[in-house]
Image (cartoon, rainbow, N blue to C red):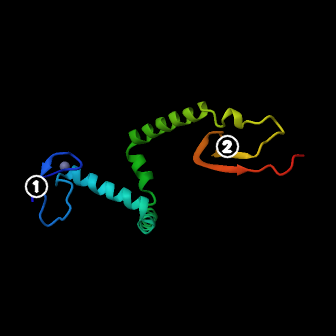
Amino acid sequence: MGTKRCLACADDFDPCPRVAAQNYCSRPECQRERRSLWQKDKRANDSDYRGNQLACQRRWRETHGDYWKKYREQHPDYEQRNRELQRGRNEAIKAAPVAKMDAIAPAGSLRSGRYRLRACGSNGVAKMDEWIVQIVVLTRA
Ligand SMILES: [Zn+2]
C-alpha cells in the first residue's frame, strides 16, 4: 500500500493497512474534520440519526437546564459580545425592506400570490422564523 493524500490537509500519509478506505491522516484536526463531515452528512440524510440527536440533546437540556444561564453569569464578555452581535442583526433587519415593493399592494387591493411571512415581536423586529405562504383572494368586499 502506497502513500495517500489526506483530504483535509493535502499532505501525504501512510494509510493504516487495517482501514480499508482511509482518506484522512491521523492528525487530530484532520480526524476532527472527517468526523464533522460524517456527522453533517448523517444529519442531512439519516432521519433516525437526526431524531436520536434531538432526543439526546433534549435529555441533556432537561438535566442541565441552567447550564447556559450559569455560563453567561461566569462569562460576562461572552454575553456582552452576543448582545452586540444581536443588536447588529436587529439593526440590519430593521434597515432591510421586509416585503418587496411589488408585493406591497395599495390598501384594499391585496392580490393572490406567494408572500414571505415573518413572525415579529412586539418591538416590530422580525424573528428568525419565516414562511413562504400562498394567499388566495376569494372575494373582495
Ligand atoms: Zn491530514
Q: Residue 101 at what x, y percent from top left?
A: 69, 32
Q: Is residue 127 left or right of residue 105?
A: left
Residue extending farthest top: 95
Of marks 2 and 1, the one in the foreground: 1
Q: Is residue 74 left or right of residue 87?
A: left
Residue extending farthest front: 2
Q: How many marks?
A: 2
Task: Quadrant for the N terminus, please.
Answer: bottom left
Task: State the residue position of label 2.
Answer: 122
Q: Secondary structure at mark 1?
A: loop
Q: Is residue 30 above or below residue 123?
A: below
Q: Secondary structure at mark 2?
A: loop
Disc 1 crowd rating (10 Å Cα; few below 14, some 14-19, many 20+) is some
Residue extending farthest right: 141
Q: Is residue 49 above or below residue 107?
A: below
What residue is drawn where x is 43% and y is 64%?
Answer: 50
Q: Nearer the viewer, residue 53 or 66?
A: 53
Q: Residue 89 at what x, y percent from top left?
A: 52, 36
Q: Amino acid at mark 1?
A: Asp
Quadrant position of residue 40: bottom left
Disc 2 crowd rating (10 Å Cα; few below 14, some 14-19, many 20+) is few
Q: Residue 24 at what x, y percent from top left?
A: 20, 54
Q: Is residue 88 above or below residue 63?
A: above
What residue is drawn where x is 44% and y is 38%?
Answer: 80
Residue 14's disc is 1
